[in-house]
Amino acid sequence: MWRLTGGFFRGLQKAWSTWGCRLCSQSSSSTQPSHHPRTQAEKAKRRQAREKAILSSDVNDPGLIWSDKEKIAYTAALVPGEKKDTTLPFPQSYSPEYVEFGWYQWWEKQGFFSPQQHSKQPHAVDKYFSFCIPPLNVTGTLHLGHALTYRRCFGSRRMQGYKVLWLPGCDHAGIATQSVVERKLMREQGKCRRDYSREEFLKQVWRWKNEKGDEIYHQLRKLGASLDWSRACFTMDPGFSSAVTEAFVRLCDSGLIYRSEGLVNWSCALESAISDIEVDSKELSGRTLLSVPGYQHKVEFGIMLTFAYPLEGQEGEVAVSTTRPETMLGDVAIAVHPDDPRYKDLHGKHCRHPFTERLLPIVTDSMVDVTFGTGMSFILTPAHDHTDFLLSQRHSLPRLTVIGGDGTMTSDCGQWLEGVKRFDARECVITALMERKLFRGKKDHPMSLPICSRSGDVIEPLLKKQWFVRCQEMGRKAVQVMEEGDLQIIPHFYTKMWKSWLSNISDWCISRQLWWGHQIPAYRVTVENSKDTEEQWVWGRSAAEARQRAAVKFGVNPDAITLTQDPDVLDTWFSSGLFPFAMLGWPQQTEDLKQFYPNSVLETGSDLIFFWVARMVMLGRELTGQLPFKQVLFHSDKYGRKMSKSLGNVIDPLDVISGVSLERLQGKVREGNLDPRESVVAMEAQKKDFPKGIPECGTDALRFALCSYKAQGEDISLSVSHVLSCRHFCNKMWQTVRFTLATLHDASLPTSLAEVGNFSVFIFCRCFTSILNFTLHCVLELTEMSVKLMDNVMCNELLFYGFIFYSVSQISKYASHSYLKYIVYSLCNALLYTLLSLVSQRNLQKLKGFLPVPLLHKNLLCLEQFFFFHWKNIKWVKCFKSKITVRYNICTISYLKPVWKMSTYENMWAVCAPDQAETLLHFRSAVCTLGQISALHLHCPETGFTDSPPPPKASAVGVVDHSICLHLSIQNSINADKQRALLSQRREKLASKLKQALARTQTPNYAEKVPNRVRQETENKIAAMEQELKNIGDQLSALEETRGKKSN
């Protein structure tokens, strides 16, 4: 939690001031990103509209429609961790349960995910790839929003020979865990935390953690995450705890951690300060009754109350406004604007507090917002308001705390209110003001109410002595590394937010008033016979070290010192900020730290950019001298409505993997702690979205669906129907392998390029192109590529054209059995394993007997080298573009023939550049067979090469790219009028596409924003469209010329 004084938190101060009626003009001019009230109101309006649509009965959407599929179970005996028997018959239908059962346990037992496997790989390279999983709360469970982070394809890095470490971790979640255990003890034993000693309570927490804390690890295993579980890290482990202590001591020694009094976000229900990320803002449009923990009746909010302070020593009064009348017992002054003519005569005067008899000076300050409340004046309560706290420093005002940590009024309020709960005291104060005839009225007032996300309590700003981290200099360095390019933030638009926030960062409060967590290694010092009453503190890695430090600091014998350790614990975000290096053994210089730090990349939700990512960067640089990672990839975690347990719309990945009934889905909502209305909305949404529940989709389908979404900066609305379609894709892969196995039999496989037919090499190169395009950040492209290869190459070309070969008796010429074997294995090995590891693993076991080379690791694909890399003696890098040229020609032919109603074999002319002519000459027979044309004539105007007369003028023209045009003879197919109509339609459509393409290239900063590859592709498309438009014009001119000759 951050200390709320200026900078980014002026936006929060505004929210607080709106609630506490203490706005100032400076707060409204903050340069920091904050939520404008109108934006919050719009969000609330959209949320209400969504709820209304969900609850309405006139929604025609039938929800997710699916039919039950046969579930096939793996029935053979299997000891957990042993390898499955893959000699069993290949089932006719794809069943996730059958395919995925048992593989992960075997992989884990064999240690396949350990970086130690690297030394056993002949294709190993001297590179590493490391990534730490964003540590998850030990109390939590994964939902589909979390699962987005686990899309990164580590299998491909292992296949490329990298030394890979993907390390799992779990956060101790101080507030959440303590709350869960406290509720459990109250429910089961009727006891609260205070009924135990600290040591006894911590034993109860550890017992709960050992019983329930591994559920999230179970979910990760079900997701198929290739994590090295032997290195699993928990933030309360002894080694990690030592790292936290070391970090605190070093930062104290360097002056970056200090102790001071400041306002913090306080949850009275938890009796602890909380971090800003744990504060929700509830927008109120006016008077609203809300349930508050600890109160039997609902409490009124959204009301502006006005009352008067009588002037001291003269007639008159000063009217002030507030939404929190209970805090008026802590008022110490009244502020007016110095230019307000109404109060010119009151400068330097005093008012008398009606309940405490305290004199309240009237001070002048230009920060007073003349548009708020009564206008021109407001009361100052420094111990309970962030803006007032700042003003109290400027005017040297006292700070009176009138609300205690437990939410009751303190003795400073007087006996009549001492011990009364704060919102009960509110009613008492209003009644007393009325009795004294000082009440001046109340009205509805739109406001933002800060709510504790952990307890639902209304946050109270309280003045506490806490430990803070100085962040200004570390924040400046974090901005510098980003600006200098040492830290890359993807998407780039987050860099502006990064710079804006870190340039105005405030100090960070790291104290938490809990028992579960890392107890702060700081000690209050009491020196024997000392008369100094001021607090004195030291810190140390142990009590003995702290005692020695104190003896040196105060110049006394260590035996004369009494140490009392701070009972507070450190903010959980502090330990999480150390995760990238503490998980590797820091501060010890372990082999893991030397090999895998800094991490290669970090991928996480964009909502953690400040609360976790920025702190990792600051602490990593300060404590290790290095950035913890060089690249950060952010994704949004929205799921239509944002995925949130508080909305009841989270979906457990295990429910998508294994399937779940509607009754069980709604049972989970009822078991939660939702507001009754929110429960109704959530269950009604489930009923409409999943009328039959969620079907069994399997791990592979879920991972493939997640990977099919853009990873960078996209608000992802993942639908279960999309996951179901990915299951259908898995079935297509399964059935294709079954077909392949049926055709293989005892066919021998070619071992050199000379034994492979030209068409087989052409298809093979298409897969090779896809592999070369696979890079770290193109998981989306990889999924699209895989779908295209499966649909176009496997199902269309290989299988469909395979039947053509059967029909024309060309099996031996094109070696159909051979290229089927090549493509099936390359697809499973080089592409789909990284996305569909379980079904690919199962297919490997069936296909490995037909592989072109012996597997180095016959059991696991991710430890095997990319298949294409075995063919290093083949000059495919040079020739694969030629094979793609062939593919484009075939596609153009396939387009031209139906447009011109051509169903029979016709002649075709290719007008092209010399290098393209050489390629087409080499693959002419394949083009004729796959394009189903009678003959392909080549014509090269540049060199004069031709093997036939030039193409006829009355021909259809298709542009492959700017260097190849295909001419299809249509003289005997359709009449001239129909040709002109078709050409005109095509010209109109092309002109529209060309206009759109040119418009995209003229957008501002096009060259800077668009990658070179995309710009080049766009330029080629524009050139091809311009060439085709020119050809269409020539054809229309020729037709007009022909018509003119006929008329003459």
Image (cartoon, rainbow, N blue to C red):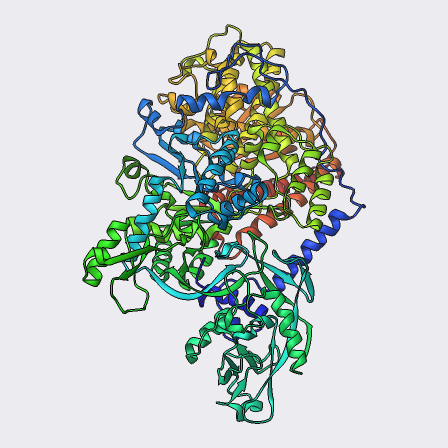
Q: Nearer the viewer, residue 371 or 717?
A: 371
| Total labels drawn | 0
In-front residue for pair 822/184: 184
Left or right of 101? Residue 953 is: right
Q: Nearer the viewer, residue 993 or 58?
A: 58
Evaluate whether residue 29 shows in this view.
no
Decide if residue 1009 is on the left or right side of residue 524: right
The quarter of the image holding the C terminus is top right
The x and y percentages for residue 921 are: 49, 23
Where is residue 797? Give x, y as percent: 58, 22
Q: Residue furthest right?
A: 58
- The residue at 41%/47% (across/down) is 576
Q: Is residue 441 visible?
A: yes
Q: Residue furthest top?
A: 746
Q: Position of residue 107 (x, y in %)?
A: 44, 23
- Classify residue 1023 as left or right of residue 871: right
381 shown above or below 119? below
241, above or below 441, in the image: above
Image quarter of the N terminus: bottom left
Which residue is painted at 50% across and 7% down in the image? 747
User: What's the residue at 43%, 47% (across, down)?
Assistant: 198
Q: Quadrant of residue 552?
A: bottom left
1046 lies above or below 330: above
Question: Residue 445: x, y in percent?
Answer: 66, 70
